[in-house]
Amino acid sequence: MPGVRLQTEMMTMEPIIPPVDRDAIERELTPERFLRHTNKGDNLLYVVDAHNSPDTMLEIGRLREMAFRQAGGGTGKGYDIDEYDTMPVPCQQLIVYDPQAREILGGYRFITGDKIDMSTGVPKIATAHLFNFSDRFLKEILPETLELGRSFVSVGYQSSKAGTKALFALDNLWDGLGALTVVYPHIKYLFGKVTMYPAFGRENLDLILGFLNKHFPDTENLVCPIKPLASNAMSPEIQERLSGGNYKEDYRILNRLIRERGLNIPPLVNAYMSLSPTMRMFGTAVNDEFGDVEESGIFLTISEILQEKKDRHIESYKCEIGG
């Protein structure tokens, strides 16, 4: 895509590091770090961190940077690893591993709210430089929240040409998130960001943001961007184009408008929108530390996730562990 190439050329890019030795990674993927089997694709889910699995962390950083650069973002460094990955109580890394190909297909990083450093009064999480948090969110909600970030699918698994493994990569990650809600029973909420890239086109981004803000507003002002994105998402023109009368019709219109431009709604955005009718959108900010991508805050109450999704990603894990 021309926009991606332009974005890349404007940044000073270090060469991405070589792949990490597969034997070194597999030595770190020990039984105690195994989380669950995926529902589809015959893959495995593990939870590791930079301290107990440094080689795996390095490979995660390499794959993340490749994936984000291809989309038009990235850090510009040889691998994407930051202070939140390496701090004393680090973010954990949820990964999908293909034991046949001996490759990491994708991942998320996460931290539970009770483990977040609040010593300065501001939570030490990646979203804190983009969003302000209300007192209620910090005191009542964050301690029971799973904060998510850095979701990625490895470049080689982003096309359907890669076979069934690629088709199920994102679904496999949701299997992992479902399992985490069981592993951490005190967690009631999921909070993260969806990233959209400038190369997607301003009008297309405004249509998606207009839809999200219309149907998933944060009416309590729990979280808001420090510097909100200036866009036409809530303009009468955009909202008039999304005037189907209800969520289902508006989504059909949005999907048609995006497809007419030869594009698709980003898979992760689609995945979040289909999880819960009570999802909240916390506004959008520009991340100037990550290629000027647009980051929109997303918040979900686990108990309000659609039953079909609970059965698929949460109840299936309970059955696997005999719960």
Image (cartoon, helix red, strand yellow):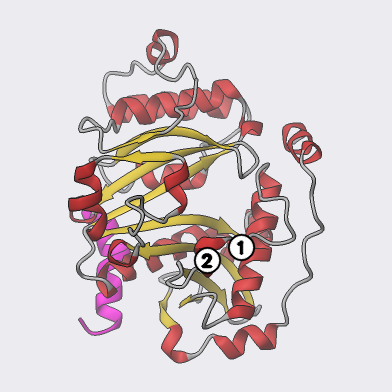
User: Residue 59, image x and y in percent?
Assistant: 66, 71
Residue 311 inside the magenta-drawn segment: yes
Residue at (68% x, 88% y) in the render: 23
Q: Is residue 139 magenta?
A: no
Q: Amino acid at mark 1?
A: Ile
Nearest to the observer: residue 122 or residue 193:
122
Q: Relative to residue 220, is residue 49 drawn left or right?
A: right
* Image quarter of the N terminus: top right
Q: Determine crowd level at label 1: few under 14, some 14-19, many 20+ residues with C-alpha closer than 10 A.
A: some
Q: Residue furthest front?
A: 120
Tally the marks.
Answer: 2
> Residue 243's x, y, as percent?
34, 15
Q: Is residue 30 above or below residue 286?
A: below
Between the C-alphas of marks 2 and 1, the distance is 6 Å
Residue in the image at 38% along x and 64% along y = 111
Residue 231 image position (x, y, % from top left): 49, 20
Q: Residue at x 42, y 78 (%)?
A: 37
The C terminus appears in which quarter of the rendering? bottom left
Q: Which residues are magenta?
A: 307-323
Q: Which residue is mark 1?
A: 81
Residue 85 — which label? Answer: 2
How packed is label 2: few (under 14 Cα within 10 Å), some, or many (20 or more)? many
204 displayed left or right of 128: right
- As shown in the figure, which amino acid type bears the numbered disc 2? Asp
Q: Are marks 2 and 1 in contact (CB under 8 Å)?
A: yes
Residue 308 sits in quarter: bottom left
